[in-house]
């Protein structure tokens, strides 16, 4: 018969379909008719276990990671941003003018007309050349004083060699190690020689006398800044460097110049500014001063305006209406230091522009050296940039050492400078036309300085100010330029469109720094600055290197309320990158009080600006908890490792307020940082700890240890750890006064009692669901162990004694324990807690605990009892060794044990609790079983193991608390030895897997311990530094995954569209599931090992299978290839009993539940590791990623390990982020994913074990449990846990509606499941083949029917289609109306009657697809449903 004929015959034999349910069950239709309810479902989607704490386990980035390519761009640290220590002053200046007016130097022929002004003074207007040069010197000094008024100037006019030498020696003696300015004007002498010699005069002015640069260096010493305004000045620069190198070479040869007043290395810090290169002459244009270079350096505003008018395309008479002084310079009213005046505003703009050019053109070290360390040097180099711009147009190229790039003359921001000059002149021109005021007759006035031959400097400045007021009476009420507004707008645009992605320095940053000086624009500038700092540490370092710190430090003295929120934010960002560099400055002028008062301010504190620093809208606001949290963060770093800061901040007020915020605030960040602030307030501060103790503050903190947020719980542990008494090597020096010693001893005793109380309380966190909490607990124990090390040596030694007693005389064990000095002590409890932590499911917590245990054992082995300890260890090891070979000797009788016999074994690694283990014939490697006695049973072909109680414990697990798996491996009991070979002979089938045979995933930041080093934990966990990283991360901008256009956003959008497409494709197929054919075999996947749990993901083409031990295989069922293989890291004797998927709407996580009560969650399990594979990643975003452990915890601590128990069963509620777990325990435990905390333990109200859990996946309030005795119970989490059981369905022998005489109704529940979709059918299947369909509102089942085999091993329900399947030896597919649609036989056949039973079955959540697996068979069979095709 053909396959088509068989298909037709099969269809013809089917009974007519029964009517299907077409109404929503359980009354859920009321909710589905609620538009509000449906909108909340559609718009709310949470992703769990994807926070930073899960991705890093509370570990901060290491310095090596910050230097890596992945992170360096975001950090770009500038460690030497602070210039306070390196700041120098130019305190003395020598102004050397070699003019010899009236006598032209012999080597230069000047044209006629030519430049004649020297320091804006025309010497031709003087009859006496002596008065002329004196006036020139006075003007030059006045111009320099405008740059630096505190520098002491000495003029040397037409000097001889002896005068120069005397001046130089005197100034060096006065300056000591500070910088000197040496200004040389050589317009009246020959140009420097080729060897760099400069010329002066003899005493009679009859000869030019050269001065060697080497002599000049010797007279002046170092450091010096040289200004050379002469022809061929480049000769001096080049030869000066040669002579410095000569000094260095002489020093290396041992010929140090003893006459030099400064060390040779100081000459490297000399700075030179020269007017032109070696082959160039100075400009001689009559429109410009003869000392144009000096004027650029000392009066840049006048030079800029004169140059602007010369270059202007407007007709020359356009600016004639503006008032001018006697030398033709336009008078700009105001004062250089008053930014509210036109002259002050231009000077302010010029500073901002030249700072910007320098900062964007120079390297950071050069910028810092030239523009931030010395005010005089900075001013001269700013003005030097103007010379670099103007003088090349006149065939003269100024040079410097250190050199500046020629590109500075072409910087685009020079256009803004021209625009600012144009705006000022235009505004003044408009005012001049409006004001018909005649210019005063007298007054030789310059912008920023005064000149004249008969009027004193002070009188001239007064005249300048009075004339400005007379000419422009309203200059203080007028805004002359829009420069700063435009630059702030440009900066705002950069922040919006380029800043977050480019991480390149913005051009406007130096300008923003200058704007902070203006009250008009200050708030806007601070807000923009805060947005820039929010981009990351790289932005903070850039701001600090540009010099932002002194400005924001000064602003802490401002009483302006509207600045508080933004200043808090800025300071938090600065402290996050370098708190040590700010602590001393915050002490000055009590800057820390700014944040102290905000933290301690009352809840209502009006501030005149919106709290969002990203807006400029003003209004009334409150200092909210975010501001307080940042203030707490700033104060915490202010006092960290800073005794003076700790002393200044410690007060009862701040402690009381912190405790109040921890207790009452809804802001987790504030609670976290209040704890960390407390931790630093009393860290290594005995007096502070005593105050805390006497005021009972620590007890209040202990009462808050169950905070719902993991980071807050961890921060409380950090605070409690620092409160513990310091170990002896860190304790402060003891007083010598006998009274003080006695008082101190009494205090110590009370504090130690408090330590024991702390330890007793924090042990309650042993079962915390968050690994960062448990990790911090290890560090608490670490300090406790180091403080009370001797007591723990006693406990560890006593543990060895207990092991020996357990072997020699187990009956005497209890009496021995009671006689032990450690019996019932907190030290014993802490030690056992440490043993538990050394078996933690999280690899990092486990390794830390093992390290600490090894530390104690090393100390014990190095103690005076080391010899005895060694003997005890050797004895225990000898007694724990298992001789497997003896078990295989045929002459040795073996002891037959009945299947199901129970025995008690010790499990010291789990706190010395005794577990009941049922050792059946299916496994020789249960958790605490051995193979001392082996037997064969012809009826069940199983092998059973037995072991005497004396052999149950190992020194490895007792001393170093290694897991039982390590014990077996250390004794060579593995699957590769003869024992396993023997079992393969008896039980042919799938390849036996090994525990840990595949890669065991670790956390992202896990670093394997170096066993070659002495085991010792660091004193701190790194959680504090991890917490600080929050303030280094962007808070104002969206996360990358939420930013449209980003790679992560596109990935998520693609996955969402894919999911909707799959749902739209599969929903219409629900009808096909009833009428279609399921007998088409898609594929057979060879898993190699025996699968025990199999599960489909919702949207990826992924099927996950776990074997009978701890190995996981991830399949791509679309192409039949393995995606990943890894091990779950189970101890020997335990296995994976449940698999769930989390966050399936996005990037899924894999959850495994094991028979020892451990939950582990993995990510990247569905990504191919080999990126070269073709067509492997559906979403097209293939990335090479290894499986990573996200988190792990012991969800059930009292789970009984028996062969009959189902192990751990779970139910994940994505809508609520809740995980329900149970098993062979008396409770159903509910874990909350966001809080990583046990919400409640709901009593099961049954003595039978739970075999299955299901829940309402939409609202999540109702869940249902199936029990081993056949009963089903319904629970409502909205009720009190003691009253949460709302319904019980117990089996009865006369079940209503079931017409089968042999029905018993007492079978164990194989599965109970509520559909996520469809009509939300609730279906249960029991081991005796009975299927019930329930409605939560009814006492009896809606429908009951029996399977064809009258027995059942597996049952599963489709999430959306009205079908289910049951299995024993074949798979029967049923409709929810009780109709058997089809039967699927084992496609692999059967090699024996005992090998044909189903092991596991599962439906695909959306597709009409299922997978099956049979006992003693490694193949996974995949089936799909297809529309019926009938051939005639």
Image (spheres, grey):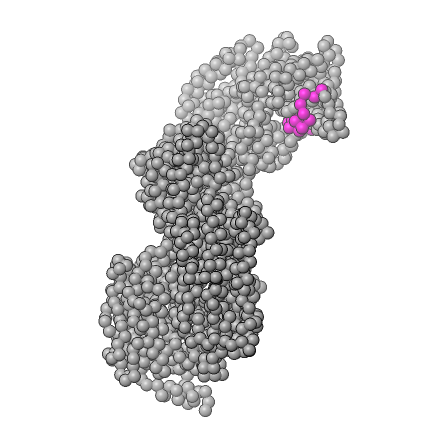
As displayed, is residue 1203 above or below residue 842? below
The quarter of the displayed image where residue 89 is located: top right
* Drawn side of residue 50 relative to residue 354, left or right: left
**Foreground of the two, 540 or 974:** 974
> Magenta part of the protein: which range?
259-278
Q: Residue 763: horizontal and vertical position, in percent?
A: 39, 50
Residue at image point 40% right, 70% down: 902
Question: Going 41% across and 19% down the picture, which residue do you hit?
Answer: 473
Residue 865 percent location from the top left of the image: 53, 49
The correct choice, above or below, for 729 with respect to 347 in the image is below
- Front residue of 1171/1245: it is 1245
Determine whether, in the image, residue 1316 is placed left or right of residue 122.
Answer: left
Q: Residue at x 60, y 37 (%)?
A: 363
Spot occupied by residue 1354 in the image (x, y as percentages of width and height): 39, 75
Q: Quadrant of the C terminus?
A: bottom left
- In the image, 126 versus 718, the foreground residue is 718
């Amino acid at each position: 018969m053909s396959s088509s004929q068989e298909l037709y015959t099969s269809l013809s034999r089917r009974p007519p379909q029964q009517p299907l349910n077409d109404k929503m069950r359980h009354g859920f239709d009321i909710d589905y008719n609620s538009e509000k309810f449906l909108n909340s479902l559609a718009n709310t989607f949470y992703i769990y276990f994807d926070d930073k704490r899960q991705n890093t386990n509370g570990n901060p980035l290491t310095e090596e990671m910050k230097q890596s390519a992945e992170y360096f761009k975001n950090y770009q640290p500038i460690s030497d941003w602070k210039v306070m220590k390196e700041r120098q002053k130019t305190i003395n200046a020598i102004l050397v003018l070699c003019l010899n007016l009236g006598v032209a130097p012999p080597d230069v022929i000047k044209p006629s007309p030519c430049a004649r002004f020297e320091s804006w003074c025309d010497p031709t207007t003087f009859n006496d050349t002596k008065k002329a040069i004196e006036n020139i010197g006075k003007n030059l000094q006045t111009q320099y004083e405008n740059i630096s008024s505190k520098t002491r100037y000495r003029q040397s006019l037409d000097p001889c060699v002896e005068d120069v030498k005397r001046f130089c020696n005197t100034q060096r003696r006065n300056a000591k190690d500070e910088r000197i300015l040496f200004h040389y004007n050589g317009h009246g002498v020959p140009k420097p020689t080729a060897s760099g010699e400069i010329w002066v005069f003899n005493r009679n002015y009859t000869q030019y006398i050269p001065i060697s640069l080497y002599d000049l260096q010797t007279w002046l010493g170092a450091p010096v800044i040289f200004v050379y305004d002469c022809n061929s000045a480049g000769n001096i620069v080049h030869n000066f460097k040669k002579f410095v190198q000569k000094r260095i070479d002489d020093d290396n040869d041992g010929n140090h110049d003893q006459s030099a007043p400064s060390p040779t290395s100081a000459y490297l810090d000399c700075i030179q500014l020269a007017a032109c290169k070696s082959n160039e002459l100075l400009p001689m244009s009559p429109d410009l001063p003869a000392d144009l270079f000096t004027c650029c350096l000392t009066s840049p505003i006048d030079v800029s305006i004169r140059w602007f008018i010369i270059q202007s395309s407007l007709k020359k008479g356009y600016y004639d209406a503006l008032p001018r002084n006697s030398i033709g310079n336009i008078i700009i009213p105001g004062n250089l230091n008053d930014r509210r005046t036109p002259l002050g505003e231009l000077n302010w703009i010029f500073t901002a522009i030249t700072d910007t050019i320098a900062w964007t053109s120079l390297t950071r070290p050069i910028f810092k050296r030239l523009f931030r360390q010395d005010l005089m040097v900075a001013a001269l180099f700013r003005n030097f940039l103007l010379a670099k711009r103007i003088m090349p147009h006149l065939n003269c190229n100024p040079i410097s050492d250190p050199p500046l790039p020629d590109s500075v003359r072409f910087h685009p921001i020079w256009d803004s400078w021209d625009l600012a000059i144009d705006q000022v002149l235009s505004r003044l021109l408009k005012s001049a036309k409006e004001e018909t005021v005649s210019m005063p007759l007298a007054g030789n006035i310059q912008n920023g300085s005064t000149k004249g031959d008969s009027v004193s400097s002070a009188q001239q400045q007064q005249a300048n100010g009075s004339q400005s007021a007379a000419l422009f009476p309203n200059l203080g009420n007028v805004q002359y330029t829009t420069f700063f507004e435009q630059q702030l707008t440009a900066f705002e645009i950069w922040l919006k469109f380029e800043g977050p992605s480019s991480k390149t320095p913005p051009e406007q940053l130096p300008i923003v720094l200058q704007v902070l000086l203006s009250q008009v624009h200050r708030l806007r500038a601070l807000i923009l600055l805060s947005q820039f700092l929010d981009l990351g540490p790289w932005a903070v370092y850039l701001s600090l290197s540009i010099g932002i710190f002194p400005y924001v430090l000064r602003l802490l003295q401002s009483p302006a309320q509207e600045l508080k929120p933004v200043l808090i934010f800025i300071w938090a960002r600065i402290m996050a990158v370098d708190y040590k560099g700010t602590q001393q400055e915050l002490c000055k002028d009590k800057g820390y009080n700014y944040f102290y008062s905000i933290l301690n301010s009352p809840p209502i504190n009006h501030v005149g600006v919106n709290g969002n620093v990203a807006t400029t809208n003003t209004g009334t606001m409150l200092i909210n908890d975010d501001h307080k949290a940042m203030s707490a963060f700033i104060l915490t770093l202010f006092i960290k490792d800073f005794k003076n800061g700790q002393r200044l901040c410690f007060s009862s007020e701040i402690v009381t307020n912190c405790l109040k915020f921890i207790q009452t605030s809804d802001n987790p960040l504030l609670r976290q940082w209040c704890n960390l602030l407390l931790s630093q307030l009393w860290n290594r501060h005995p007096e502070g700890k005593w105050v805390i103790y006497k005021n009972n503050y620590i007890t209040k903190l202990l009462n808050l240890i169950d905070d719902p947020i993991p980071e807050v719980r961890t921060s409380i542990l950090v605070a409690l750890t620092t409160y513990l008494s310091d170990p002896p090597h860190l304790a402060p020096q003891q007083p010598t006064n006998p009274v003080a010693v006695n008082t101190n001893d009494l205090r110590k005793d009370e504090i130690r009692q408090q330590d024991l109380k702390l330890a007793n309380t924090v042990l309650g966190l042993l079962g915390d669901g968050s690994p960062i909490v448990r990790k911090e607990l290890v560090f608490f124990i670490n300090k406790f162990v180091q403080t009370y090390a001797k007591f723990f040596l006693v406990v560890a030694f006593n543990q060895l004694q207990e092991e020996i007693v357990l072997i020699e005389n187990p009956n005497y064990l209890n009496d021995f324990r009671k006689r032990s000095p450690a019996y019932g002590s907190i030290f014993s409890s802490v030690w056992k807690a440490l043993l538990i932590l050394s078996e933690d499911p999280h690899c990092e917590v486990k390794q830390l605990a093992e390290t600490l245990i090894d530390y104690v054992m090393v100390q014990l082995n190095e103690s005076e009892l080391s010899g005895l300890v060694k003997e005890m260890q050797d004895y225990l090891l000898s007694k724990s060794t298992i001789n497997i070979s003896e078990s295989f000797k045929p002459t040795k009788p073996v002891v037959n044990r009945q299947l199901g016999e129970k025995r008690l074994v010790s499990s010291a690694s789990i706190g010395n609790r005794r577990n009941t283990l049922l050792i059946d014939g299916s496994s020789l490697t249960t958790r605490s079983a051995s193979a001392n006695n082996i037997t064969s049973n012809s009826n069940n072909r199983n092998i059973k193991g037995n072991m005497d109680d004396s052999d149950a414990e190992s020194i490895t697990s007792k001393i170093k608390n290694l897991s039982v798996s390590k014990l077996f491996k250390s004794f060579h009991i593995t699957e590769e030895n003869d024992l396993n070979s023997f079992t393969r002979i008896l039980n042919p089938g799938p390849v036996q897997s090994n525990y840990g045979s595949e890669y065991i995933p670790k956390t992202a930041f896990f670093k394997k311990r170096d066993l070659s080093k002495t085991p010792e934990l660091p004193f701190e966990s790194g959680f504090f530094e991890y917490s600080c990283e929050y303030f280094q991360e962007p808070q104002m901008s969206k996360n990358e995954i939420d930013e449209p256009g980003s790679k992560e956003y596109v990935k998520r959008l693609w996955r969402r569209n894919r999911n909707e497409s799959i749902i739209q494709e599969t929903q219409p197929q629900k009808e096909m599931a009833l009428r279609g054919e399921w007998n088409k075999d898609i594929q057979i996947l060879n898993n190699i090992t025996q699968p025990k749990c199999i599960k489909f993901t919702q949207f990826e083409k992924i099927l996950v299978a776990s074997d009978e031990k701890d190995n996981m295989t991830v399949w791509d069922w679309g192409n039949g290839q393995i995606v990943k293989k890894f091990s779950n890291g189970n101890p020997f004797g335990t296995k994976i009993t449940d698999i769930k998927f989390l966050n399936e709407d996005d990037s899924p996580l894999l959850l495994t539940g094991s028979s020892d009560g451990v939950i582990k969650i993995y990510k990247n399990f569905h990504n191919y590791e080999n990126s070269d594979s073709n067509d492997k990643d559906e979403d097209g975003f293939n990335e090479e990623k290894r499986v990573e452990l996200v988190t792990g915890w012991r969800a059930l601590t009292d789970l009984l390990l028996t062969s009959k128990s189902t192990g751990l069963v779970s139910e994940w509620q994505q809508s609520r982020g809740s995980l329900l777990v149970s098993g062979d325990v008396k409770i159903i435990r509910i874990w909350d994913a966001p809080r990583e905390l046990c919400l409640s333990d709901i009593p099961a109200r049954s003595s039978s074990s739970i075999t299955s859990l299901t829940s309402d996946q939409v609202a999540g309030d109702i869940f249902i449990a199936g029990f081993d005795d056949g009963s089903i119970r319904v629970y409502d989490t909205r009720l009190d846990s003691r009253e949460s059981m709302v319904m019980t369905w117990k089996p009865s022998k006369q079940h209503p509606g079931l017409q089968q005489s042999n029905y018993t109704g007492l079978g164990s529940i194989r599965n109970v499941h509520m559909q996520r979709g469809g009509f939300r059918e609730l279906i249960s299947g029991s081991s005796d083949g009975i299927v019930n369909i329930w409605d939560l509102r009814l006492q009896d089942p809606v429908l009951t029917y029996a399977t064809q085999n009258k027995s059942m091993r597996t049952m599963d329900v489709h999430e959306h289609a009205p079908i289910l399947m049951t299995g024993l030896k074949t798979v029967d597919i049923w409709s929810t109306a009780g109709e058997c649609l089809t039967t699927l036989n084992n496609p692999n056949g059967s090699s024996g009657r005992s090998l044909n039973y189903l092991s596991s079955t599962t439906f695909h959540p959306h597709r009409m697809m299922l997978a099956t697996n049979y006992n003693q068979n490694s193949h996974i069979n995949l089936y799909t449903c297809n529309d019926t095709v009938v051939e005639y």
